Amino acid sequence: MALTNLRTLGLSGWFGLGIVIFFTAIGIFCPLLAPHDPAAINPAHSLAAPSLEYPLGTDNLGRCTLSRLLYGARLSFGTAAVAAIVISVIGVFVGAISGYYGGWLDGILMRVVDILLAFPSMIVALAIVGTLGAGIANAVLGLVCVWWVGYARIVRGMVLSTRAQPYILAAHTIGASHRRILRLHILPNVIAPVIVLVTLELGQLILALAALNFLGLGAQPPTPELGSMLNAGRPFLQTAPQLMLYPGLAIAFVVLGFNLLGDSLRDTLDPYLRRS
Amino acid sequence: MTNYIVQRVLALLPVWLGITLLAFGLGRLAPGDPAYLIAAQQSDGPPPTALVEQIRSEYGLNDPWFVQYGRWVGQVLRGDLGVSYKSGEEILNAFLHRFPATLKLAVAGLLVGVCLALPLGILAAVRRGSFVDHLSRVIALIGTSLPGFWLAYLLILLFAVNLRLLPVSGSSTWRHMVLPVLVLGLGVAGSLMRLTRSSLLEILGQDFIRTAHAKGLGSLHVLYGHALKNALIPIVTVMGITLGHLLGGSIIVETIFAWPGIGKLLVDGIGNRDYPLIQSYVLFMGTFFILISLGVDLLYIVLDPRISYVKRGAADGAN
C-alpha cells in the first residue's frame, strides 16, 4: 500500500524527502565528506574567512566550520532518530496494552499520560536533564520520558477502534491468544499511522534536542552538535555572525524537510491523522 | 453551571496530585545524598559524618518514600516549597517575585501570535486556494521549522546590532520587550493560523451556514455572527495550550534576552545544581497549567452555553 501511494506524495513531499535523504547521506558519509577533524584546534586560523582549505571558514578556536557542521548534523539527526525510535516503541507498547486490555491498567497508564500532557514537554524534559546532569544521553532520556505520551494516547485510540472490529472477535472465537491477536491483527493497523506521526514529529524532536543542546545541557565540548554550536557562537554574534548562521540554517532545513515529508505522508497514507 | 465547575475541579485534582508525585520523584532522582548536601551548606569544608546523620534523622530522610512524600505535600499545601540551595531564598517567594515578568512576556507573545494568526487564518479559509491561502501555508511551515532561539539571534542581529533600533537584552523599558515578544509570537502564529483556517473551513461547510446565506444575510454577517463564533472553541482550547507552551518556551527566550523571569531562574538553577528549585519549578508550573486548563474549561461556558448541560461522561467519552 505504502509504496504505490508514495507516487502521490506531491512536489513538497518529494522536496522534503530529498532534504531528509540529503541529511541522512551526510550522517552516513560525513567522515568522507569532512575536510578536517571537527575537533582539531588551530589557533593560527582563528575565525578565518572561507578559503579553499576551510570552505566555510573557521570558528574562534580555528576549527573547520564545515567539518563541524557535517558532524554536528550527524549527531543532531542521529540522536533525534534514536529518541524517535525509543519513543515510538514505548508509545506503541503502552498504547496497545492500555487500549487492548483496558481496565485498571488502562486507568493508571492514561492518568500518567494525562499528567505528562498537562505540561509543555520541554519543561519536564528540561527539569529531568537538569536534575540528572548535562549530557547527550540524558538529553535524549529527558525527551523520551515526556514525548512517548502523545504516541501512547493516539495508539490507544486506534487500538480501541480496531478491537471493536468483527475480525478480532472472530480471532478470539477460533482460540487465538491475546498476544497473537495484538501482534498479528492489531499492531499492523497501528504501524502506518505511527510512521507518519514519527515523521511529522521528528522535526519537532530535532528542535527540542537542539534547544537542550543550546542551553548547554546536551553534547559537551568539543563534540560538535548543531544546537551547541549555536550556543558556542553566541559571543561572536557581532564579529562573526556566520558561526550562528550556518548551524541554525542546517537545523531549519532538516526540520523543514521532515515537516514537508510528514505533511505529505499524512495526506497520502493516513486518514486517521488527517484532521488533527 | 456550578455543577460543571465543581466537576472540572474534581477531575483536575488527581492530575495535580500526579504532578506533585512527578515533582517529588524528580527530587529523588537528583544525584548525591540530600543529607550530605544540606550538611555541606551548614559547615565549611566536608561536613562531619555525625552532622550528616543528625540532619538525616532531623529531616526524616530515613523514612519510607511515601511518608516523606506525604510530609512534603503537607509543606507544599502550606506554601512552603523550601529554600534554594544556592541563594538561600524562599523558593515560593522567588517564583512569585519573577512570575509576573514571565507571564507578561508569554501573554504579550500570545497576543502577537493571535493578532497575526486570526486575520490571516480567516482570510485563508474564506479565500481557500487563493494566494493568501498558499502564503499562509508557507508562513506556517517556516514558523514551525525555524528554531526559536535561532530566530531570536537573527532578530537581534538585524534590529539591535545592525539597525540599532532596539536593545539587545534587559528588561527596563517596553523596547526591551519587543524582540522577545516577537520571537514568542512568531513561533506560535503559524500553527494557530492553520488551526483557525481548518476549524473555520469545517464550520463554513455546514448546513446552517448555507441556510444563513440562503436567507439573504450578508457574507460578513455570516462570517462573524455565525461561523467565527463556532470556530472559536477549538481555537480557544489551543490558545490555552499555547499559553502553556509559551511559558515553557520562554525559558530559552528569557535566557537569551536576560529577561528576569522564572524561566531564567530555572536555567540558572540547573547551572547551580539547585535541585529543590528545579523540583519546585515543575510543581509551580504544573499547578499553573492546571489553572489555565480550568480557565479554558470555564471559557467554554461563555462560548457555548450547551456545554454546561452536557453530562461529564458524554463530554469525556471522546478520550
Image: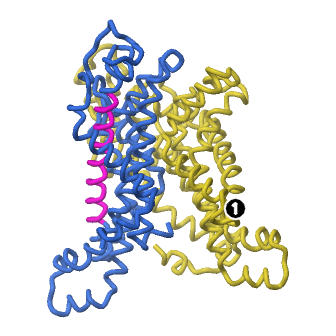
Chain colours: A blue, B yellow
Front-lying residue, B309 or B237: B237
Front residue (pair B43, A134): A134
> Is residue B36 toward the left or the right of residue A153 in the image?
left
Which one is nearer the viewer's eye here, B63 or B125? Answer: B125
Residue underneath mark 1: B122
Q: Residue at x 64, y 23 (%)?
A: B160
The span shown in magenta is A68-94
Badge 1, how many Cα within 10 Å: few under 14, some, many 20+?
Answer: many
Residue A69 painted magenta: yes
**In terms of secondary structure, where does tag 1 sit?**
helix
Q: Position of residue A200 (x, y in %)?
A: 41, 57
Magenta span: chief secondary structure = helix
Quadrant containing the N terminus of chain B is bottom right
Instruction: Please state which amino acid type lies under the numbered disc 1.
Output: Ile
Residue B79 in picture, x, y percent from top left: 53, 43
The residue shown at (45%, 62%) is B14
Residue at (29% x, 33% y) in the render? A135
Image quadrant in which you'd find residue B27: top left
Quick check: B133 above or below B207? above
Q: Is residue A128 left or right of residue B62?
A: right
